[in-house]
Image (tube, helix red, strand yellow):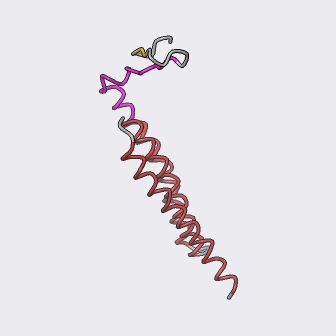
Amino acid sequence: MTLQWIKLAVSALFLMTGLIFMALSVFGVNRFRKALNRMHAAAMGDTLGILFVFIGLILMRGISMDSLKLFLVILFFWTAGPVSGHMISRLEAMTDEDLGEILVIDKSNPESTRENGGEA
């Protein structure tokens, strides 16, 4: 009986950790202005959130075929997510005309700023 409560507590901890990562990624997506920054926040939160949620579900279910299926879903998301994120980011980099404009602030002279990533 005590072992079941420990298993439930550890599972709930993983589930809550995954939900927290997913909720934080929502704030990260809404906080950033550039599309690539938003994609990074969404991808990191999504990847970690899904990992922790599914680990919690696997622990809750125990060793079974359902656990194997959940593990295969994790592998699919971890394979497909970075590939699709990379392709979308390449599309954004190819089509965004303002992507190369970087604001550089000279730390020795805070009043001066230069565009296009030149030497400060």
Horizontal side, residue 22 vs residue 9: left or right: left
Image position of 69 with respect to 120: above or below: below
Image position of 110 with respect to 4: above or below: above
| Residue 96 counted in the magenta span | yes
- Residue at the spot 45% in from the left edge and 41% down from the top edge: 40
Image position of 33 with respect to 56: above or below: above
Quadrant of the drawing holding the N terminus: bottom right
Residue 69, position in %: x, y? 51, 66
Residue 12, position in %: x, y? 56, 72
Instruction: Out of 33 and 70, give the one closest to the viewer.
Output: 33
Of all residues, the one furthest to the right in this rendering is 2
Image position of 46 with respect to 106: above or below: below
Residue 43, position in %: x, y? 45, 46
Horizontal side, residue 99 vs residue 111: left or right: left
Instruction: Out of 28 and 60, give the one closest to the viewer.
Output: 28
- Residue at the spot 30% in from the left edge and 27% down from the top edge: 95
Q: Please give the range of residues in magenta.
A: 88-106
Instruction: Out of 45 and 118, give the one closest to the viewer.
Output: 118
- Residue at the spot 45% in from the left edge and 45% down from the top edge: 41
| Residue 7 counted in the magenta span | no
Q: How many marks?
A: 0
Residue 66, position in %: x, y? 52, 72
Of all residues, the one furthest to the top in this rendering is 119
Horizontal side, residue 20 vs residue 63: left or right: left
Instruction: Out of 109 and 33, give the one closest to the viewer.
Output: 109
- Residue at the spot 42% in from the left edge and 37% down from the top edge: 37
